[in-house]
Amino acid sequence: MVQLWRRATRSTSSFSGSVELVTTELIDGFGRVHHDLRISVTDRCNFRCTYCMPQEGMEWRAREEILTFEEIERLARIMVERYGVDSIRLTGGEPTVRARLPLLVEKLAALGVDLSMTTNGVSLPLLADELKRAGLKRLNISLDSFRADRFLELTRRDELQRTLAGIDAALEAGFDPVKINVVIMRGINDDEILDFAEFGREKGVIVRFIEFMPLDADEIWNNSLVVTQSEIVDILGAEYDLESVVRTSAPATRWRYADGKGEIGVVASVSESFCESCDRVRITADGQFRSCLFATEETDVRALLRDGSSDDVVAEALERTVAAKWAGHQINQVQFIRPRRSMSEIGG
């Protein structure tokens, strides 16, 4: 029988100085300790990526259904102060379409966590400096093709140049590292793997290749479209001398270039799942708490936040959800069940 709650001491910092907190680690029934929180701040997006949402017919959540900045901050504070969460990533939809986003960044940065964000990059020429000043530390920028026609087909938006400008803006603002997320799909963009590697080496950004996962709204996913980690590494290894980097709880398996010009990563959710080391939990834009990206059940913490429930009651709901987390998502097995929500509704 696994002990689900364990006392631990950690140090954090705030604007008033260093504070030592005694926390209870958030452990599931398989002994996994959860330190990474993904927060979706909106279900809306200015792209319509084919593997993320349908071209038409999306019904956006009403404003009153979306968590306020104060509610997000409260949930994050509970996770940080009670459970030692030390990494928070903002996601969407597209997080930069949320009005006054730097204000939320400032609130969360004050918790003393490693604060990052995943974005499509098109708003960064306007927002990068402000987000950096507010306390955002790292950026992941999604980019799946350097070909304008292919970019348009994949995103249903003619915004390649603005995305590239957003990468430049992130670098100029001083974000380090800047990571480029590339969803690789067979017969669609797998012929650009080496182009992305060279781009990363020249720009000084880290490219992360992501296996195509069954979270697309139009349900076009099938296993034949998945370019596996081993295939990607074989392609790169034929061109570059790669050295393996010791694996952490992060989702990407990493390799560095032997000549010192950076590194690449592969998120092999399908072919070589890393569920046994997963330390991530998620909050959707409408306040549903999920213990797994592929979870089929959610916990409505928004209702608790709005009915006057204490932090203790909210925390108990979080603990119950994590305690019930399953061993893994079971992609490629007959018992796999697709989540009811698409990626845009869950948050990456």
Image (cartoon, rainbow, N blue to C red):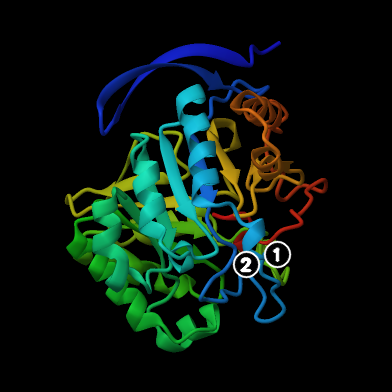
Residue at the (34%, 68%) spot, across then down: 196
Q: Amino acid at mark 1?
A: Asn
Residue at the (53%, 32%) spot, across then down: 277
User: Number of marks in the image?
Assistant: 2
Which quadrant of the structure image shows residue 61? bottom right
Q: Amino acid at mark 2?
A: Leu
Which quadrant of the structure image shows residue 60? bottom right
Which quadrant of the structure image shows residue 93? bottom right
Q: Residue 146's spot in the image, x, y percent? A: 37, 79
Q: Residue 318's spot in the image, x, y percent? A: 64, 31
274 or 287, nearer to the observer: 287
Q: Which residue is mark 1?
A: 222
Left or right: residue 118 compared with residue 304: left
Pointer 2 and pointer 1: residues touching (CB < 8 Å)? yes
Mark 1 element type: loop
Mark 1, Cα crowd under 10 Å, few <14 / some 14-19 / many 20+, is few
Q: Residue 335's spot in the image, x, y percent? A: 82, 45
